[in-house]
Image (tube, grey):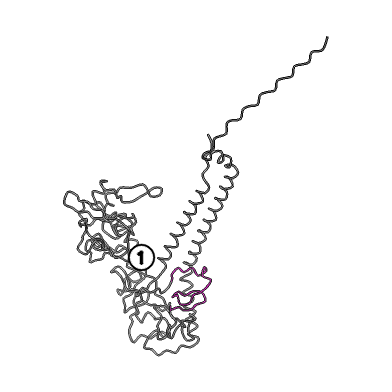
């Protein structure tokens, strides 16, 4: 039997496709997730900006790059930043962030109660300028598992969102659409639908049917007819699926991927469980107590003037501050010498300007160093993968030319195979001469 060689050209094409797919996935996720937008949908900063990869600067692109101190995106940036050079004015500490006071050119302090990011959900928390940066602090939200929506339909917070079956049905199909009858989910348990709870195995091709407790954590079924129009606000690629159970219960679903990020799936925080008191987390029903036990305790329970956020720190009410929310903010409170109050006539000294700039520079470096290293590390993995693929292709190509040339040439289409060589006929020994008489 002859050895069959894989066409090296095919290997090259497949390898290039894999590399392109990997790089596109990484870069697309970074480009979407790393941008931070303010309430006017304007880019304010790039959280995971790979500084080491940016060798040149472009003043006016709203991104503070190396050798830039500010960038408002236009030539006229006000009194804090020179929009043509992207450098701070001589008396400015900050110049372009949402927490930079445009009248004093110093960051707003916490006592100014400046909201830089509003809460977008009852499980979310507003962010206040803290005086440590011209940018908004990291997004925080209420702990996972606590009740929300006035406990209607047993909704619970998860990742800053209050969601359950009824709320999500309203977002998908309209405010008057509610969750389908439980028989829609029982049909999934009995295997009467083609959409499983999850996929497992190599390449996620093995369908796993729902367990008893997981039935209401998979595909979301809503009580609506098949011609109901999708009103979901964000773009989504999916298809409608409609069944009628027992002739009466309508089961309208939106099929797509089996990811919890799919709007057609039951959202995290929704109630679930027949044998347990659970909540959906990642298309799986888990005990509510298990989620609540992960909540970190805050000092003095935030003194009754705040709430523990998802990081285990006190998120104080607007009129309180400090690590345990015990300090009340009032007009009689002494103002920090950083010009944080807009009505305050502030003339900073050169020492105050230098100290403020150093503080912001140190804060920016510590906040961005980890993402920068992560982005560089990710790039190193991609480059290493590409090099390994190129080396493998080179080795296969060399083997092809060394051992496969003759086989390939012999088996070309339209070429008759060579007949086996005929063994040589042995020579007839010479007859000895007869001597004369």
Given residues 107 and 52, the one toward you in this image is 52
Range covered by the magenta-colored residues: 46-73
Labels in figure, total: 1
Which residue carries the number 1 mark? Answer: 296
Is disc 1 placed on a helix, strand or loop?
A: loop
Given residues 428 and 303, the one toward you in this image is 428
Is residue 50 magenta-colored?
Answer: yes
Magenta segment, prevailing SS (helix, strand or loop)? loop
Q: Is residue 35 above or below residue 94?
A: above
Seen at 24% across and 66% down, the residue is 149
Q: Quadrant of the C terminus?
A: top right
Residue 184 is situated, as x and y percent measured from the top left of the image, at: 22, 51
Residue 283 is situated, as x and y percent measured from the top left of the image, at: 32, 55
Q: Is residue 425 above or below residue 43?
A: above
Q: Is residue 131 found left or right of 227 in the rendered image?
A: right
Which residue is most to the right?
Answer: 437
Is residue 15 magenta-colored?
Answer: no
Q: Is residue 95 above or below residue 433?
A: below
Given residues 97 and 108, the one toward you in this image is 97
Residue 220 is situated, as x and y percent measured from the top left of the image, at: 26, 56
Q: Is residue 43 found left or right of 406 in the rendered image?
A: left
Q: Is residue 288 visible?
A: no
């Amino acid at each position: 039997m002859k050895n069959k060689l894989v066409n090296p050209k095919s290997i090259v094409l497949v390898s290039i496709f894999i590399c392109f797919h990997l790089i596109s996935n990484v870069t697309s996720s970074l480009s979407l997730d790393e941008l931070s937008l303010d309430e006017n949908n304007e880019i304010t900063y790039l959280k995971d900006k790979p500084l080491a990869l940016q060798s040149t600067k472009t003043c006016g692109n709203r991104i503070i790059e190396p050798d830039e101190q500010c960038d408002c995106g236009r030539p006229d940036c006000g009194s804090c930043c020179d929009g043509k050079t992207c450098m701070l004015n001589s008396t400015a500490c900050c110049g372009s962030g949402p927490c930079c006071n445009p009248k004093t050119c110093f960051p707003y302090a916490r006592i100014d109660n400046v909201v830089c990011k509003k809460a977008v959900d009852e499980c979310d928390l507003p962010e206040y300028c803290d005086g440590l940066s011209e940018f908004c602090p990291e997004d925080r939200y209420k702990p996972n598992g606590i009740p929300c929506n006035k406990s209607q339909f047993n909704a619970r917070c998860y990742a800053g969102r209050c969601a359950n079956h009824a709320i999500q049905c309203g977002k998908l199909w309209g405010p008057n659409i509610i969750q389908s009858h439980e028989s829609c989910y029982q049909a999934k348990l009995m295997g009467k639908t083609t959409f499983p709870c999850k996929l497992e195995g190599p390449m996620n091709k093995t369908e796993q049917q729902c367990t008893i407790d997981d039935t209401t954590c998979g595909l979301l079924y809503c009580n609506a007819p098949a011609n109901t129009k999708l009103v979901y606000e964000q773009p989504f690629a999916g298809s409608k699926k409609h069944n009628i159970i027992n002739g009466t219960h309508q089961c309208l679903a939106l099929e797509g991927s089996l990811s919890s990020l799919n709007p057609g799936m039951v959202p995290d925080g929704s109630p679930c469980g027949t044998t347990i008191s659970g909540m959906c987390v990642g298309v799986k029903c888990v005990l509510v107590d298990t989620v609540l036990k992960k909540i970190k305790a805050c000092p003095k329970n935030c003194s009754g003037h705040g709430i523990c956020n998802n990081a285990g720190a006190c998120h104080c009410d607007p009129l309180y501050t400090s690590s345990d929310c015990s300090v009340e903010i009032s007009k009689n409170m002494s103002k920090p010498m950083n010009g944080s109050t807009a009505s305050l006539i502030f003339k900073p000294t050169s020492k105050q300007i230098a100290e403020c700039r150093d503080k912001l520079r140190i804060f920016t470096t510590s906040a961005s160093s980890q993402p920068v290293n992560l982005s560089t590390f990710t790039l190193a993995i991609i480059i290493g993968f590409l090099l390994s693929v190129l080396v493998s292709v080179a080795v296969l190509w060399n083997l092809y030319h060394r051992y496969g040339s003759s086989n390939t040439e012999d088996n070309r289409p339209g070429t008759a195979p060579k007949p086996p060589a005929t063994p040589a006929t042995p020579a007839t020994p010479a007859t000895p001469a007869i001597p004369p008489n």
